[in-house]
Amino acid sequence: MDFKPDFYKDRQSRPHFARCLATHTETGEKLVVYWKLGVMVYRARPLASFMERFTIFGSKEPIVPPLSSITPVTLETNVEPGLYRHCKGGLYRVMDLATHTETEKKLVIYCAVTVEHTWPSLEGEYWKLYWARPFKMFKDGRFTWLDPTKPLQEFST
């Protein structure tokens, strides 16, 4: 299935922006993380279902709005946006929360800091760069929030 981050329309011709593909950490399922224009609340839909229900109408080049322009929905929960360290040592940035369209479960969408500002090849398996982890699993102690007032080098050790 050919997916790229871009503008899509649903069956009623309502515009949506597909931000990225994320891999569900429990099931390995590929999820499209998107929002309806004007609503700015993330949804996560299985890739096959998304490609069946949506058609692309956007630009020729991938468009990724800066995260600072996205209204976060994480304020409703106790997951702070920003940097986190995984218990195995990796640094990750929480993008936002999304609701799975089939299960209605909250998912934390995040990516590795090392790849956040690079756009991988559209021919490659770029979906592996983003992760969708169930909210309860994210909060089980394996991730530690990093204080943004500390210098970044303190986080590297």
Image: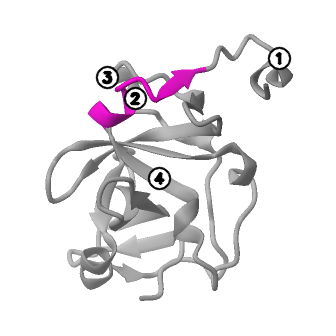
Is the C-beta separation of discs 2 and 4 under 8 Å?
A: no
Q: Amino acid at mark 3?
A: Glu
- Which residue has dot 4 on it? 131
- Of badges 1 and 2, the one in the foreground is 1
| Circle 1 SS class | loop
Q: Which mark is residue 57?
A: none
Q: CA distance from mark 1 to mark 2?
A: 24 Å
x and y percentages locating residue 21 in the rendered image = 47, 65
Marks 3 and 1, how far apart at CA: 28 Å
The type of residue carrying mark 2 is Thr
Pointer 3 local density, CA inside 10 Å: few below 14, some 14–19, many at least 20: few
Of the two numbered discs 2 and 4 on the same chain, state the one appearing first in sequence. 2
Q: Amino acid at mark 1?
A: Pro
> Which element carries disc 2, helix, strand or loop?
helix
Callout 1 crowding tier (Cα within 10 Å): few <14, some 14–19, many ≥20: few
Q: Name the residue carrying label 2.
A: 74
How far is disc 3 from disc 4 in space, using C-alphas?
20 Å
Q: Residues within 10 Å of mark 2 (few under 14, many from 20)?
A: some
Q: CA distance from mark 4 to mark 1?
A: 26 Å
Q: On screen, 26 above or below 21?
A: above
Given contact means CB atoms under 8 Å apart, are the residues at marks 2 and 3 in contact? yes
Query: Which of the two labelled residues, at mark 4 and mark 1, occupies the earlier sequence position?
Result: 4
Q: Which residues are magenta?
A: 135-145
Q: Which residue is mark 1?
A: 151
Q: Residue furthest left?
A: 103
